[in-house]
Amino acid sequence: MKSPDDLRCILRKQWEDANHRQRRLLGHQDVWPIVLSIGSPSPALLTSQLHVVKQHIQAWRDVGVGEVVWEDKRYRATGEKVRVPVRWKIDKPSVWIDACGDSAVRGEYQSLAKLIEHSDPMFHSLLIRRRALWRDKPIDEVITAGKLAMQLGPGDADGRPLRLLSLEGIDTKFFERNGGLIRSLLDVRFDSEPSRLGLETFLGAPDESDNWLLVVDLDGGLLPFDRQRVRASELCGCRLPGHHLIVVENETCSHLLPAAADTLAILGAGFDLGWLTNKSLTEKRVAYWGDIDTWGLSFLAKARSLLPDIQALMMTPDVFEQHHHCAVNEPVLADAKLPQELQPAETSLYERLLTEPRGRLEQEFLPTDIVHQAVRSWIDSPR
């Protein structure tokens, strides 16, 4: 036997559940009405605590939200039927919110209603499920972020800092305040590529943050630690030990790299490659290894524009062909314009990837022995 407050508590907990919110607010017909069981008083309760039963019945008579379903129950103690509440039916979202009896829930619902009214339907699930993206922001600013996300695409910054983009009348701090929200909205449009690449890289803007990159000592004796994180800004001016340096797009494949004498690896740079202008790097042999896709080749081209003697590792048409069975679709392509710094074979590969149904061969899927062989061959080869 549940009181109105008991069931209101259940309804509020359901509001906190992202799956319930999504299904109920996006109009799935099979979820309405919500039917909550109230339960009937037991014969023992009716006999021993009649006043409690009367209070229970009166409490449900006072409920003015939704539909309270009543049934006549026969009890031996009364000798006649007693009309008791058995179910509470809620038939639409606004009634669900009223039934919760919670001002915070009502406020969120009203905010969501405004967001859904003024945003593209493709964003509705994200906004409903991930309230933390917008809950502490002005709703009008969230709506502006949604409109902005519908306008932006790969490379649209065209080399300008994000703070200088003039769209939808935004101010210079808009991306600083709402970068996570905009990235999440763009993830919906572009199959999570903005998160994979980083928002600045995806939009073609310089990364003005000071990222931490992973430095791995493949020699085992060049650094005090096997691996450590270093700010990209520090790499611009420091003199790194060792004669060989391997720049790796993704740090998730550090386990594939072999032990190698006199060699460091720097992983996770993505498009944050400005530190390659460090003059001391011209004294080393430097290689670049990235995904074989249009983005990976674009990163290679940028690396080569900063350090012309850098050599590509495992980014050839032959490697792509031999391991094509591991390739997947590249949901969002980099610029259709061919990067000028690519070599002829790389340019041909880039052109192929622009129309290849499975045009992404991620580093992590190359066999360990292939990676070891390629790294050691590069180290052993003459400069």
Image: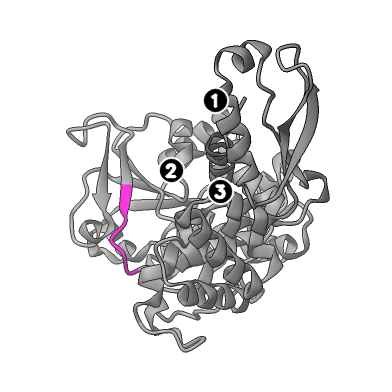
**Magenta segment, prevailing SS (helix, strand or loop):** loop
Q: What element carries label 2?
A: helix
Question: Mark 2 or 1, which is nearer the eye?
Answer: 1
Label located before the other in sequence (2 or 3): 3
Residue placed most toward the observer, 260 or 120: 120
In the image, which disc is placed on residue 251?
Answer: 2
Residue at 59% across, 42% down: 11
Q: Residue 100 carries which label?
A: 3
On the image, the x and y values in percent for residue 211 come to: 31, 56
Residue at (55% x, 18% y) in the render: 49
Is 103 left, or right, of 54 in this rendering?
left
| Of callouts 3 and 1, the N-terminal one | 1
Disc 2 + disc 3, Cβ < 8 Å: no
**Residue 300 appears in the figure:** no
The three-letter code of the residue at mark 3 reads Cys
Q: Is residue 199 magenta?
A: no
| Dot 2 or dot 1, earlier in sequence | 1
Query: Which residue is nearer to you in this view: 318 or 76?
Result: 76
Magenta segment boundaries in residue numbering: 208-213
